[in-house]
Structures are given as C-alpha cells and as structure tokens.
Image (cartoon, grey):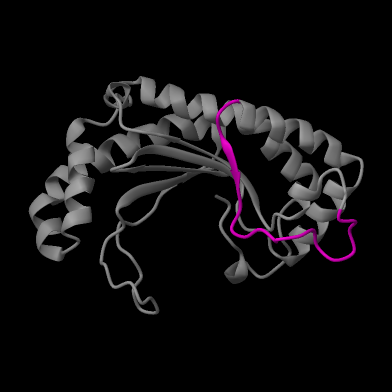
Amino acid sequence: MAFGGWPEAAIDFFEGLERDNSKTYWTAHRAIYDEAVLGPMTELTEDLAGDFGPARILRPYRDIRFSKDKTLYRTEIGAMVGFAYIRLSADGLGAGNGLFHLLPDQLARYRQAVAGPPGAELGRITTAITAGGAELIGHDRLKTVPRGYPADHPRAELLRYKGLAAFRQWPPEPWLSTPAAKDHITGFLAATAPLIAWLERQVGPSAEPAGSRGSRR
C-alpha cells in the first residue's frame, strides 16, 4: 500500500505515551500504534528505500539496563533510510541526514578535508542547507577549534564538529496526514544529498570494529 500520511491518532498516541510511559498504556494502545504509527512508517520507508538506501525501523522499546532513565518506550518512532534518520513524535515529523558520530579515523579525515581545499565546497554546501531551513548537528562540538588548527581558520565552526549532519523538524500540521508528508522528507533528502556525497568522498566508512561504530544519523 502506498504511503498516505499519518492520521491524527499517531500524534495522540505519542502525547498519551509521554503522559503515561507504562506497559499498561502500551498494551491498551498497541493496536493504534501498529495501525496509525508503524503502518505508515513502514509504507514510507518502503517507498524511500529504492532511491535513498536500505531501510530499517527502530524498535519502540528502550534499553534501560545501563540507563538512569527507566522509561520503557521511546516517545517517537524512528527509522534509518540510507544515511538518513526519520522520526515521528508528538512534536511532529523530523529528519536528519549525515554522519552524526564520527569515529577517530573518520574524524581525522574530516578535519583534514575541512581545513584543506575540499572544505571550501563543504562550506558552500552547509550554507545552502541552513539557508533552506535545516540546522547542522553532531553528537558533540568543541568549544574551540581542535588542537593543531588556527583559531582564525575560515572554517573554524565546521572544524569544531565531531560529527556532521543536517536536521529539519516540522510541527504537526494538516499535511502530516496526507502523502505530502513524504514530499517533505524527499525534499529534505534531496537538499542534503550534496552533504552526503561530500562525506562519502572525504570521510568514508570507519575502519574501526563494527561494534564500536556510531550512528549514521
């Protein structure tokens, strides 16, 4: 079945889950989750996979074994499509695209590229992305440029990132329950495609063991 958007019941489900993050609530509303939340996300990711890469929907259950936060369920549904992360929550629809967490070997290549001639291209790409309404994010950002780089480097801001991705959030609006929701995501992915291409050329995958790899969100 083709993606047709998320019904209002999807937002209502997450608003309720934020108020009552319990097995009782989850069990009582599981059918709503399956039909109004998971079903549309499955349809959307299947539609996107052919153009943007393999898709995987994340589990709704939180791993609380080593966390101080013992809430049982994620208050959003998230999915990976290629390099991109897509989420739906009570706050609306969000999408990220990039390398959110750079491992040491990736970070070294990223900084070398940013500081050198390829960095000028990245500067133009990120300027266009932010002008289009998205923001730049990463799992961490230094307060100053990393050691060994001049403080007045023209791309000092980009050198401070330890992961680089673009992110866009849309609040719940009527179009969310229509096929236009897919258009918002595909428009974002198209706008951020130059960032992905740059990261693939200049940074590439990590040679670190698979178990140590960070998120590609």
The front one of 140 and 88 is 140
The front one of 98 and 81 is 98
User: Quick check: 167 left or right of 146?
Assistant: left
Residue 43, by quadrant, is: top left
Residue at 58% x, 39% y is: 135
Query: Where's residue 138, x and y in %?
Result: 61, 53
Inspect the magenta stretch and tell me whether residue 100 lies in it. Answer: no
Residue at the farthest bottom position: 66
Q: Which residues are magenta?
A: 132-151
Query: Where's residue 89, x and y in %?
Result: 31, 44
Residue 195, by quadrant, is: top right
Image quadrant in which the N terminus is located? top left
Residue at 89% x, 58% y is: 149
Residue at 84% x, 41% y is: 119
Query: Where's residue 11, x and y in %?
Result: 23, 39
The front one of 75 and 4 is 75
Residue at 31% x, 32% y is: 172
User: Quick check: 214 left or right of 95?
Assistant: right
User: Quick check: 133 left or right of 77?
Assistant: right
Q: Main secondary structure of the magenta part?
A: loop
Query: Where's residue 72, x and y in %?
Result: 25, 66
193 to 208, vertically: above or below: above
